[in-house]
Amino acid sequence: KVYTDYFFDEPAYNTHDGGYVPLERMKVPEQRLNVPPLLKPDRETETDIYYTLVAKAGETQLLPGLPTKTWGYNTSLLGKTPVFKKGKHIHITLKNELPELTTFHWHGLNVSGPIVDGGCHAPVYPGETKQIDFTLDQPAATTWLHAHPCPSTAEQVWHGLAAMTIIQDDVEAKLPFPRHYGVDDIPLVLQDRRFHENNQWDYRADYDPDGVQGPTALIDGTVNPYFDVTTQKVRLRILDGANRREWRLHFSDDLTFTQIASDGGILPAPVKLTKLMLTCAERAEIIVDFGNYHNGDVVTLYSDDVPIVHFRIGDYQPDNTVIPDHLVDIPNPEPTPNLPIKKVVMSGMDEEVMLDGKKFDMQRIDAKQKVGDVAIWDITNTNDMTGGMVHPFHMHGCQFLVLSRNGHEPYPNEHGFKDTVGVNPGETVRIKVWFNLPGVYMYHCHIIEHEDGGMMAQIEAFDPEHPKTYDLMDMDTL
Ligand code: C2O
Ligand code: CU
Ligand code: CU
């Protein structure tokens, strides 16, 4: 079966919002896709690996003419890609060379909060260096790193502080997927910006409390990119790294592609699609088979009706690998008996956004859940069907399973682990949540201006045998 649907409620597409900024076709010449290089470890042993991440300001040549002032991790824009092997002990040095404080948030990693997780309680001040270390016990996945200082997460991500991260494990390694990074395994960070005078970005000028947008698609930090295809099959690790934009992706000729992974790892079964909508912070890994195309052909990836990447087909060896019908087993623990259903309400738009009727408070713990307990959460978006928004609900410190949407089956590509799920206006999405590590974790809308605007709360995952107290930062102690 091939699905030919975006699944989300069409009246809720961000295109219907009065403040929507449509993407525009770029008139600049096509440029080679700037695939982020892998981040080289400082050193590696059988058991341990060491990385250094430097948040810094720089300049990037994005358009003909003047370079654009940008921020990035170990590079001038976005970041180099670290690879984490499941089970290895990972040590990371975090360096802040920016003129203001930042944090290093591991979106999608099950690491302890609030410090290693890198949310707003873990500032690294200008000129400062900090160390974190962790071991990952979660399946292979495409996750990401981004700045998360409250309330300037949105502005820092807009400047460029977002990088792809890859988790590898033995299960994924045995599946017949392309995995030659940069050749047939390609990260695609989807963002959008507006270029002002002298090719500069101006966050304040473009500010919109419902999320900042720009008319120019920026893919891996490249305007109007092309990618040279040298293999029949290409795996794309797609991240919606935009502050607010939803991407409605499809290829020329309505080419069918296969989704193999969602936010938190490989799907139990591949899903064939011709259309894919991603909301902010969601990831999808897809495999595209260019077997019907020949040297000289171009296959275009679109969002709505605007081309965003041109795949230039070259010579390739025939590839007859078949994606198996069953990929991985997803653990699906029984809910802990007698736990009440945890209800979460996302309400409002613009400055009125709230979570459970409140604005975020860094010092308030809004909920508690015992480590290891498996709880049912109902996430409701009270926006109106007409004129509301899809709010992408994200949780730190865990990967959850989507059980239902308004009592109906989740979308066909939502049967794997997720850390972010788009909730339509008027909808309740039921998810199953458990934490493996004690800590304080944020959960919020991932339209980043909504998060900065207070549509966020935090939960303590606690271990009754080892009670902990947390030193929670306050806005003015920062
Ligand atoms: Cu992508 Cu609270 O984060
Ligand atoms: Cu996160
Ligand atoms: Cu929102």
Image: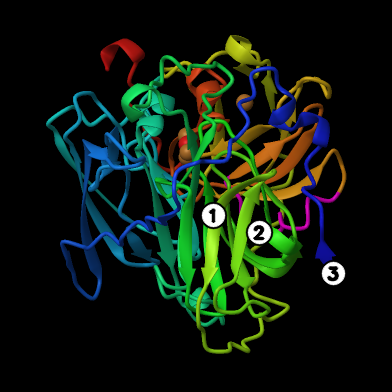
Is 463 or 157 nearer to us in this picture? Answer: 157
Where residue 298 appears, as percent x and y from the top left, is 59, 66
Residue ID at (52%, 59%): 237
Q: Earlier in the sequence, mark 1 or mark 2?
A: 1
Q: CA distance from mark 3 to mark 2?
A: 18 Å
Which residue type carries mark 3? Lys
Q: Which residues are magenta?
A: 409-419
Circle 2 — which element?
loop
Which residue in the protein does label 3 denote? 1
Which residue type carries mark 2? Gly
Residue ID at (78%, 28%): 425
Q: Earlier in the sequence, mark 3 or mark 1?
A: 3
Which residue in the protein does label 1 denote? 309
**Mark 2 residue crowding within 10 angstroms, few (<14) / some (14–19) / many (20+):** many
Which residue in the protein does label 2 denote? 416
Residue 32 shown in magenta: no
